[in-house]
């Protein structure tokens, strides 16, 4: 089931006659399924934050269509079960962390007893119970992120939009936040995660969309983006054998005494290579598709013209 | 509304605004005590203690109305000027707008909550000083309700201007500048007969007359209130009241419309 549906979305910021208009999003189509962690990636100015703001109705749409659980962003009910952690947030600094959670609960129209219970539970979950009654302006960046994450979860959201949630958080805190995100996903809720930390997105996200200059450069499962489907690594004891693969099987990328990397036009050919190696009486230990980091894949995607967006 | 009221109350409490009103109240009480020490001689030989008490009680309300117009209402404007620009700060407005409320209800709730809180503080301060007048000067006039009405209407008008200026400019100093400009324009328009006489130009006279019926008239409301307090006028001029209220309500609608169309 789709929770967010974006169809041919265009957002143009008018800056006046002299400077010209800024195309923040250009005919972007994508969807977020229920129960998935969806990573939104892109270089600075790619339109990631605009995308989140459009989904929430904070920014108006120029053309196209966006729905959250079937409702347009102009309908406030579309945000009833949506949590949001903005980038560079400045929560009301006259509140304590606890008051911020209560305020969020009230704004979502949740029953008083219920949001008080949730506030206590979430403060505990993000490790902020000790600082709950301290004024927000006294919080460190990491503490602000934690309390921000807690407030985003107050409405028991079906969809969580997180813009740089681990910004300023130490490595231990990041790991904890990752665990929280997985826990939320396991409950069947969806998360849209906007982060510059690609390694982090790679760890938690199920699918990612890569935006570049307002256009969708790539949208695919993380597994697909990080695997080189055409390259395989065969771990085997080659010893000093001078191995030469027939050209019709594939191209040898690298060969050492312990491993062979081959590039195949057809992934099915890997079976022929295994047969060939076994025929040569080479003992195979493992065969696995070559992996690349999400960062590498990201760099390739943003270097390509965006018309080639593919799933 | 509940959430925004909570938000506004927390903001006012944190900014310790209450203490400013407490300080003013204490000053008012001290002034009343000081006044009670002054010996008053009766001017007319046939005047009674009852007459004097009535004069004193009306005098207290007269002074309190003047203080309300010159100090309490401007103070309310000054203190509330930063509320909307504060809410619209980058990074904070995203937080507010991501909640399941319409933009109109968010803005109107915030404005009304601010107006309610500051009006209650101003009226409470006024009533305490008025009661101290009753204790120390033996003067208690129910005409104080005219003053309370003046505060309620005037602060509503100025808070609507603050809200408009806050949404349009998003900066506290410019909000104050726009409030001051509005005050000056309404003062200028109140001199419309003089302008017509001096310019002797039909177009200018017509323009000024039109603007006069559009702009709020808190100054004239004050003059009307003082006439009622003093009992010098039995007729209440409805034009200043209606135009002030209509201006405020229309301005709130316009502001709400602008807010709805803005990108943040």
Image: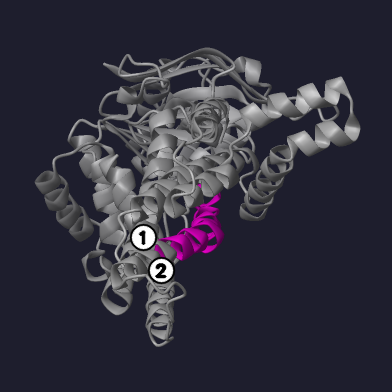
Residue B170 pos. (x, y %): 61, 45
From the viewer's perspective, is residue B46 above or below residue A58?
below
Instruction: Decide: few, some or many residues near mark 2? Use Cα within 10 Å; few <14, some 14-19, many ≥20.
Output: many
Residue A133 visible in the displayed image: yes
Task: Please give the residue where the numbered disc 1 appears in the rendered image.
Answer: B121
Q: Secondary structure at mark 1?
A: helix
- Along the line of sight, the residue nearer the viewer: B258 or A46: B258
Q: Quadrant of the N terminus of chain B?
A: top left
Extent of the magenta region: B60-87
Q: Secondary structure at mark 2?
A: helix
Disc 1: host chain: B
Disc 2: host chain: B
- Along the line of sight, the residue nearer the viewer: B123 or A240: B123
Q: Quadrant of the C terminus of chain B?
A: top right
Please report whichever mark, 2 or 1, sits nearer to the chain's N-terminal start.
2
Task: Please give the residue where the numbered disc 2 appears in the rendered image.
Answer: B21
Residue B185 pos. (x, y %): 71, 41
């Amino acid at each position: 089931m789709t929770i967010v549906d974006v169809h041919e979305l265009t957002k143009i910021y008018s800056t006046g006659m002299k400077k010209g208009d800024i195309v923040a999003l250009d005919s972007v189509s994508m969807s977020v399924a229920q129960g998935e962690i969806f990573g939104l990636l892109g270089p600075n100015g790619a339109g990631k934050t605009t995308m989140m703001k459009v989904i929430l109705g904070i920014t108006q749409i120029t053309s196209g269509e966006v729905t959250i659980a079937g409702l347009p962003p102009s309908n406030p009910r579309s945000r009833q079960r949506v949590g949001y952690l903005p980038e560079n947030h400045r929560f009301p600094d006259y509140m304590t962390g606890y008051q911020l959670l209560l305020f969020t609960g009230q704004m979502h129209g949740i029953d008083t007893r219920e949001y008080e219970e949730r506030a206590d539970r979430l403060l505990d979950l993000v490790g902020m119970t000790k600082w709950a009654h301290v004024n927000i302006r006294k919080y460190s960046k990491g503490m602000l992120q934690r309390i921000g994450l807690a407030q985003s979860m107050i409405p028991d959201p079906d969809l969580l939009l997180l813009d740089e949630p681990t910004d300023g958080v130490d490595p231990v805190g990041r790991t904890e936040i990752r665990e929280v995100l997985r826990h939320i996903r396991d409950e069947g809720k969806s998360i849209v995660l906007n982060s510059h930390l690609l390694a982090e997105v790679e760890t938690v996200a199920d699918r990612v969309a890569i935006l570049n200059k307002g256009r969708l450069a790539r949208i695919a499962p993380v597994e697909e983006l990080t695997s080189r489907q055409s390259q395989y690594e065969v771990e085997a004891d080659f010893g000093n054998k001078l191995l030469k693969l027939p050209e019709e099987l594939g191209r040898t990328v690298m060969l050492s005494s312990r491993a062979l990397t081959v590039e195949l036009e057809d992934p099915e050919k890997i079976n022929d290579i295994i047969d060939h190696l076994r025929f040569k009486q080479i003992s195979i230990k493992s065969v696995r598709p070559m992996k690349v980091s999400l960062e590498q894949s990201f760099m390739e995607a943003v270097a390509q013209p965006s018309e080639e967006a593919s799933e | 509304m509940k959430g925004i009221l909570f938000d506004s109350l927390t903001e006012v409490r944190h900014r310790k605004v209450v203490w400013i009103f407490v300080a003013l109240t204490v000053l008012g009480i001290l002034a009343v005590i000081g006044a009670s020490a002054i010996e008053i001689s009766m001017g007319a030989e046939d005047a009674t203690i009852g007459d004097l008490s009535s004069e004193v009680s009306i005098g207290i309300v007269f002074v309190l109305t003047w203080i309300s117009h010159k100090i309490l209402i401007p103070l309310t404007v000054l203190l509330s000027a930063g509320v909307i620009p504060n809410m619209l700060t980058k990074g904070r407005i995203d937080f507010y707008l991501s909640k399941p409320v319409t933009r109109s209800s968010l803005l109107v709730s915030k404005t009304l909550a601010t107006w309610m809180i500051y009006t209650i503080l101003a009226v409470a301060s006024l009533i305490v000083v008025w009661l101290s007048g009753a204790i120390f000067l033996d003067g208690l006039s129910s005409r104080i309700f005219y003053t309370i009405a003046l505060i309620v209407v005037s602060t509503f008008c100025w808070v609507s201007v603050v809200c408009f200026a806050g949404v349009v400019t998003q900066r506290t100093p410019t909000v104050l500048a726009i409030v001051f400009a509005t005050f000056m324009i309404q003062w200028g328009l109140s001199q419309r007969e003089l302008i017509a006489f001096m310019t002797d130009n039909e177009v200018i006279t017509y323009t000024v007359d039109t603007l006069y019926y559009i702009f709020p008239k808190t100054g004239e409301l004050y003059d009307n209130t003082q006439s009622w307090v003093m009992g010098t006028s039995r007729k209440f001029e409805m034009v200043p009241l209606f135009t002030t209220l209509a201006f405020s309500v229309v301005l709130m609608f316009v502001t709400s419309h602008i807010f709805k169309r803005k990108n943040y």
